[in-house]
Image: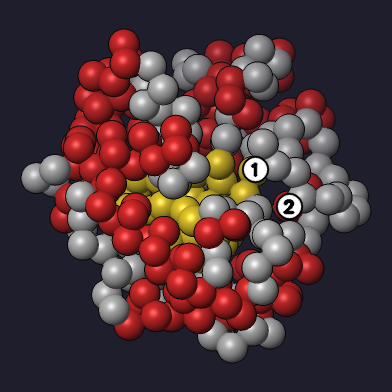
């Protein structure tokens, strides 16, 4: 992987470091009019050290993976590439076949991190066995899960090879704080970073007065404050989506924003932390 241009990193359980701020691609490759802008944004993100790129076979039924593969042609080695297998493709041979299809769309010979997109009906033993096979074949370098709650994680830990999980990608932002109660402590105990998707709640939380007030104090935008809040922890990776270059630069600048104790207290007042277990939220 290329230089991270001073982007803070976090270690995976293997010891390999990845940027705490990456790039998401959910909703990409849906509108031909946005394609050039999406590709330009992805390349700028690479230039700015946001080299972790997250996609999934589900996004646009493979179209987002194809766009990522096309964009990264010639720069594949600079990126830490994350994609996901759908739960109904998560059987032993089905996972291997799904991975081959993703590799082809991504125009690469390996996926850096391969995730089970959410829990389905296939026994976890089968999916983990497939992940092990793909690791041995060099088709994937790490594997993890997405949208797993603490009970799922405990079950996974009891599966042969299940302790090799590298991350759990979940919904986390100021309005979705349930994971702070039990899931984040569980992952920290296991030395597994959490990957936060929709860290600004797809823009819905940005008009909040408390966010705007903190943003004014720092001469920042509400989106940068929301992102800096997610990134205040040293065990969370954020993967915001940005389809325009100015949005990429805005996200990147959030790394330089340090929230004060007063800022954090004001945000806690506006977006109270949970006081007990909450069912895992998904988008």
Colour scheme shown: secondary structure
Above or below residue 123? Residue 150 is above
Residue drawn at (56%, 46%), measured in percent from left and top?
196
Residue drawn at (73%, 38%), measured in percent from left and top?
176
Residue drawn at (29%, 69%), measured in percent from left and top?
139
View extreme (bottom): residue: 160
Q: In which quadrant of the rendered image does the C terminus lie?
A: top right
Q: Is residue 53 left or right of residue 276?
A: left
View extreme (right): residue: 276
> Splitting the image into 4 quarters, where does residue 68 fall?
top left
The earlier-in-sequence mark between 1 and 2 is 1
The one nearer the camera, 123 or 178, is 123
Q: Is residue 171 left or right of residue 22?
A: right
> Splitting the image into 4 quarters, where does residue 97 fall?
bottom left
Q: Is residue 190 left or right of residue 80?
A: right
Q: Is residue 34 visible?
A: yes
- Report the label total: 2
Q: Is residue 253 visible?
A: no
The one nearer the camera, 132 or 19, is 132
The secondary element bearing badge 2 is classed as helix
Question: To which residue does mark 1 refer?
Answer: 172
Q: CA distance from mark 1 to mark 2?
A: 7 Å
Above or below residue 175? Residue 85 is below
Question: To which residue does mark 2 refer?
Answer: 179
Above or below residue 192? Residue 8 is above
The location of residue 197, given as percent across then percent down, is 55, 41
Contact, mark 1 vs mark 2 (Cβ under 8 Å): yes
Q: Is residue 36 left or right of residue 181?
A: left
Q: In which quadrant of the rendered image does the N terminus lie?
A: bottom left
Above or below residue 150? Residue 268 is above
Residue drawn at (22%, 24%), measured in percent from left and top?
40
């Amino acid at each position: 992987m290329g230089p991270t241009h001073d982007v803070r990193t976090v270690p995976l359980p293997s010891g390999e470091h990845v940027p705490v701020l990456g790039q998401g691609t959910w909703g990409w490759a849906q509108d031909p009019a946005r394609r050039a802008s999406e590709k330009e944004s992805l390349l700028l993100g690479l230039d700015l050290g946001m080299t972790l790129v997250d996609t999934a076979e589900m996004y646009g039924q493979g179209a987002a993976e194809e766009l990522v593969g096309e964009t990264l042609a010639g720069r594949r080695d600079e990126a830490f590439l994350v994609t996901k297998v759908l739960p109904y493709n998560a059987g032993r041979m089905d996972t291997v076949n799904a991975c081959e299809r993703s590799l082809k769309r991504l125009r690469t010979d390996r996926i850096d991190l391969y995730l089970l997109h959410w829990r389905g009906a296939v026994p976890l033993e089968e999916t983990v066995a497939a992940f092990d096979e793909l690791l041995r074949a060099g088709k994937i370098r790490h594997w993890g899960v997405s949208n797993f709650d603490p009970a799922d994680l405990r079950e996974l830990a009891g599966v042969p090879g299940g302790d090799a999980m590298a991350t759990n990608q979940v919904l986390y932002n100021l309005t979705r704080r349930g994971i702070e109660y039990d899931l984040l402590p569980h992952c920290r105990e296991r030395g597994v970073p959490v990957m936060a998707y929709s860290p600004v709640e797809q823009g819905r939380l940005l008009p909040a007065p408390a966010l705007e007030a903190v943003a004014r104090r720092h001469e920042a935008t509400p989106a940068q404050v929301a992102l800096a809040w997610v990134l205040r922890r040293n065990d969370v990776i954020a993967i915001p989506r940005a389809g325009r270059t100015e949005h990429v630069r805005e996200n990147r600048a959030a790394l330089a924003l340090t929230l004060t104790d007063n800022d954090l207290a004001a945000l806690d007042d506006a977006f109270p932390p949970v006081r007990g277990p909450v069912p895992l939220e998904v988008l």
